[in-house]
Image: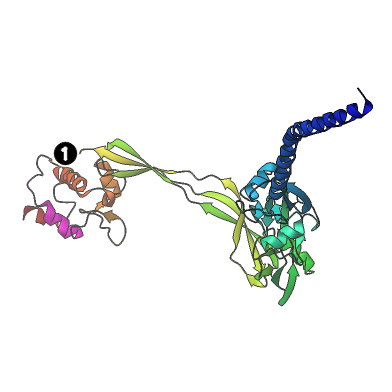
């Protein structure tokens, strides 16, 4: 074959091979293009959901990227637990957009003793000064148990505050007005330049907490002591005695008063005398009780030979019918005006005027049996009507 014949055939073969190769390359490139297109679309979605937000936790700010839809999701992603005393702004549940700022302030417990009153409070401030401002506590001139700049950690702290108060002291005829954050009235007195001497005191307990606007009087106390000897009354003990007629009492042992030495304090407060006050007592002699026997014996009322007479008439004549009657001389007593000697010879105890009327009549009947009406020379005739 001549060269002229072979050339054209070779050219036609290469053209067919190029036309055949193009569809094959397209088939190989199409999947790659689809992957690239898919990745390009996903990147756009990725960029659309990413948000740049600023998160500040207890004053510590930081910028972060998040896919969270709202504040709740963001806090959960950051492992931030929110308690009842914490503050979150904006509020949990609020939708997030790029550029938002979220602030979290954790609550801190403070055991606050304010002007003597102790209670637990919560604050989101991280310093004592901030907590006082947040709680509305007036700190000007106040006593603080810790510095205003003291940091308050998440565990909290204990804080004692005594606010400045106005006190008025009245002493030695003058008024003293002061501003103080003292813990006691005594301490405020010292700040006012006033001193308690010897037995001096104040109108309120010196160690009590001073209140705002309180007026306190200083009591200057002087005084003397006085010692007296005083009698101690005896008590009376009554005991039943079956040997005595019922209704009769007899003193078996007289009582003896005791004696004690008593010390009294006579105070003068701001020039005014007070009632003496007992401060000590010493027993010198103990009292002895009086012992009285009380009769329980039932006496007979009948005496043979004397019943049936007008004993009421005799009693009215002799004593006006009064069992406790005593004559002007004090010698005779009772319904029938017995003297003590006769009364006791008839078995009576004590004095006749102290005995029951029934016993007096019984003794009078016994006397009549032995002596007739002679013991009653004037009124004896009444016995027979």
- Is 309 in the magenta? yes
Up/down of 102 relative to 202, above or below: above
> Camera-side residue: 150 or 257?
150
Q: Residue furthest top?
A: 1
Would residue 367 appear left or right of 188 to someone viewing this image? left
Give residue 339's position: percent from left, percent from top: 27, 51
Q: Residue furthest bottom?
A: 174
Give residue 170's position: percent from left, percent from top: 69, 73
From the image, tell me which residue sits under label 1.
Answer: 300
Up/down of 81 relative to 26, above or below: below
Would residue 213 appear left or right of 368 to someone viewing this image? right
> Camera-side residue: 329 or 256?
256
Q: Residues within 10 Å of mark 1 (few under 14, many from 20)?
A: few
Rendering quarter of residue 171? bottom right
Give residue 298's position: percent from left, percent from top: 21, 38
Q: Secondary structure at mark 1?
A: loop
Q: In the rendered image, which quarter contains the N terminus?
A: top right
Residue in the image at 27% along x and 60% along y = 327
> Camera-side residue: 167 or 71?
71
Does any portion of residue 325 appear in the rendered image? Answer: yes
> Camera-side residue: 113 or 356?
113
Rendering quarter of residue 221? bottom right
Q: In the rendered image, which quarter contains the C terminus?
A: bottom left
Bounds of the magenta segment = 304-324
- Is 283 in the magenta? no
Give residue 309's position: percent from left, percent from top: 8, 49
In this rendering, the count of numbered labels is 1
């Amino acid at each position: 074959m001549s060269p002229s014949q072979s050339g054209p055939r070779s050219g036609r073969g290469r053209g067919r091979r190029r036309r055949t190769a193009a569809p094959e390359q397209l088939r190989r490139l199409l999947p790659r293009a689809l992957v690239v297109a898919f990745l390009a679309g996903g990147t756009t979605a990725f960029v659309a959901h990413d948000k740049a937000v600023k998160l500040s936790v207890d004053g510590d700010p930081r910028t972060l990227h998040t896919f969270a839809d709202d504040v709740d999701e963001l806090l959960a992603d950051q492992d931030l637990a929110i308690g009842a005393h914490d503050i979150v702004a904006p509020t949990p549940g609020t939708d997030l957009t790029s550029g938002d700022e979220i602030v979290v302030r954790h609550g801190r417990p403070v055991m606050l003793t304010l002007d003597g009153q102790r209670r637990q409070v919560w604050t989101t401030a991280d310093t004592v000064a901030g907590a006082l401002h947040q709680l509305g506590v007036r700190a000007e001139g106040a006593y603080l148990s810790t510095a205003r700049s003291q940091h308050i950690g998440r565990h909290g702290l204990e804080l004692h505050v005594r606010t400045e108060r106005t006190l008025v002291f009245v002493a030695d005829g003058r008024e003293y007005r002061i501003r103080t954050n003292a813990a006691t009235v005594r301490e405020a007195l010292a700040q006012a330049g006033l001193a308690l001497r010897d037995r001096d005191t104040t109108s309120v307990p010196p160690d009590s907490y001073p209140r705002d606007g309180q007026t306190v009087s200083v009591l200057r106390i002087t005084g003397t002591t006085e010692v007296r000897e005083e009698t101690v009354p005896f008590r009376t003990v009554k005991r039943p005695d079956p040997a005595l007629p019922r209704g009769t009492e007899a003193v078996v042992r007289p009582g003896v008063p005791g004696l004690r030495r008593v010390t009294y304090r006579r105070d003068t407060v701001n020039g005014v005398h007070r009632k003496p006050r007992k401060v000590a007592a010493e027993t010198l002699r103990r009292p002895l009780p009086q012992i009285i026997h009380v009769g329980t014996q039932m006496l007979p009322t009948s005496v043979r030979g004397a019943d049936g007479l007008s004993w009421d008439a005799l009693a009215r004549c002799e004593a006006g019918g009064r069992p406790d009657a005593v004559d002007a001389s004090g010698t005779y007593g009772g319904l029938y005006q017995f003297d003590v000697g006769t009364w006791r010879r008839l078995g009576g105890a004590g004095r006749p005027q102290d005995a029951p009327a029934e016993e007096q009549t019984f003794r009078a009947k016994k006397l009549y049996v032995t002596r007739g009406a002679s013991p009653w020379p004037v009124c004896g005739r009444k016995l027979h009507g």
